[in-house]
Amino acid sequence: MRERGGVSMSMPLVNAEFVFTQPDGTRFRVRGTGDQHHAIFKTLDGYTVVRDQASGYYHYARLSDDGETLVPTGITAATAEPRLLDLNPNAQPPTIPGAGLPRTSLSRWEIRRRQRQSAMHISVTANMAAPPRRATVGQYVGLCLLVQFPDVPGTMSAAEVEAYCNKENYSGLENNGSVRDYFFDNSDGKLAYTNIVAPYYTTKHPRYYYTDEKIAYPGRAQELVGEVLAYHVASGFDFSHLSADSDHHIYAINVFYAGDVVNNYAQGLWPHSWHLSAPFNVGLGKLANDYQISNMGRELTLGTFCHENGHMICDFPDLYSPSDGWNGVGSFCLMSYGGIPPNEKNPTHICAYLRHAAGWTSTSNVISPRSNYSLRAGRNEFAIFSKNNAEYFIVENRERTGRDVGLSDSGLAVWHIDESGSNYDVGNSPSKQRECTLIQADSNQSIDDGTDLYPDGENNQLGDATTPNSKWLDGSSSGLDIQNVSSAGPSVTFSS
């Protein structure tokens, strides 16, 4: 069982355990599925709970009369036996409700990404060359802020956080490398991302001031980030080395606060990734805006930190969705399930699509008829077959070793890409298509079942007439023909 503070829902989770606290101090255990925008919680015996906005208590929930939403029953969770109250277990509407951060405003990384997607959509429909991607290569520097409270001092040393962020071959707290190591490895050495770790700041108020659930979320977190920044500006902290975009917004601000998470979901200082209510001028023409905030008890893990910095530094999208049961592309990418338990200390690789888009490709093969290819695992060696600048297939070799030891199987991963689409919000994407789809060799809707990569048993080919097939999204023949896929291993060969 993971108490609150061990797991954050700034990333997607399915049936992760938390302990919630009612306003009168009563504690009860729940399992949560969702992320920081959408979530549903059930007691361990399967009864759905929902927060009553008027009282602040969690009540057992029922479906609304139209079956579309959850409403409180008026029966406080954990104070009565639900089986004796004629309640239906597992009440759940067709879509997981929005219960956390609203999606009515965008972080800077989302704005940058949507601007490029809009230009991509125009260029494809106009049959023009797509605008260049923003390659994330070279030296990037983020900021890590350490916060303690007068009544809750820090238990993690600044030196440990510095090593966790930046030390080469870091192995502290059972992590496989540092944050710097993770991005360096995934980029084949093309991205050196480090963080400047600021000295501990002790807040003006006790912890309960910032965790006050009467204040609209995430107001107290935004206030805390602004308070820390104001202190460091007044103290003469050097912000000049931080990387910023063309509009002078600092790419990444990471905030660690001392102690455990004492709030329920989407309240107070519940861990999340968001942006300030207004950009904060730190001087030197630089603006602070995007941030992630998480507690820091006695443990640091790579998964959430790397996932959120994938957003902020690289503009990577989420590759999971509330509409597909949160599965997305499963554990085959950090931006889906690759960094959640049990892989939180050794996240799997970022998928080929995003590594290629970030400018990290080392070897690129254009797939053509009657040709043979060999791809090494753990390297940015890809094979690509394109329709245009937005839609294409990209192939990589994944092996269950090293950073990918947490995968469900090994072999060729074949990705179908629509760069103008969206996995998280497909209905509002310009093309109404998913951005990134793993073509599962077993043609099964279930992902991470050990039979997703090629070859899967007797299935070692992909073409227009196979199941699954290699047709374009409009149903037309692509002509992509992958045959004779060799056994999984450090190197996999195939022909076309």
Image (tube, rainbow, N blue to C red):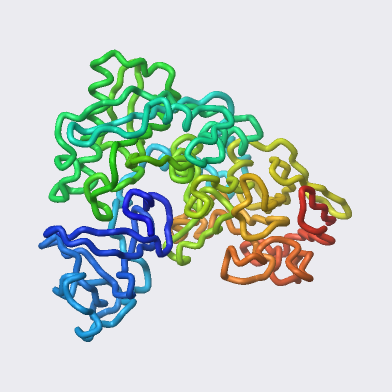
Q: Residue 202, percent across and down?
A: 22, 27
Question: On the rendered image, what quadrant is the N terminus found in?
Answer: bottom left
Up-down: is 330 above or below 176? below
Examine the rendered structure and indicate whether residue 334 appears above or below residue 447.
Answer: above
User: Looking at this view, is 339 or 164 the one in front?
Assistant: 164
Q: Would residue 261 be seen by someone viewing this image from the given angle?
A: yes
Kindly identify the residue that appears in the image at 23 percent across and 79 percent down: 82
Q: Looking at the picture, how far across and down is residue 466, in whole percent?
A: 75, 70
Q: Position of residue 389 (x, y in %)?
A: 64, 46
Residue at the spot x=22%, y=86% of the render?
86
What is the number of callouts on the image?
A: 0
State whether residue 379 is above or below residue 495: above
Is 135 positioned to the left or the right of 484 in the image? left
Task: Using the image as rendered, state which of residue 371 and residue 132 is in the foreground.
Answer: 371
In this rendering, the answer to whether 463 lies above or below 195 is: below
Residue 170 placed where, x, y %? 54, 32
Q: Quadrant of residue 120?
A: top right
Name the residue nearer the viewer: 16 or 482: 16
**Residue 246 is at least partly visible in this image:** no
Relative to residue 19, is residue 491 drawn left or right?
Answer: right
Identify the residue shown where x is 20% and y is 63%: 51
Q: Residue at x 59, y 32 (%)?
A: 184
Q: Residue 221's quadrant in the figure?
A: top left
Residue closest to the eye, 481 or 128: 481
Q: Quadrant of the C terminus?
A: bottom right
Does residue 389 appear left or right of residue 98 in this picture?
right
Judged from this view, the residue extending furthest toward the top is 236
**Residue found farthest to the right:** 370
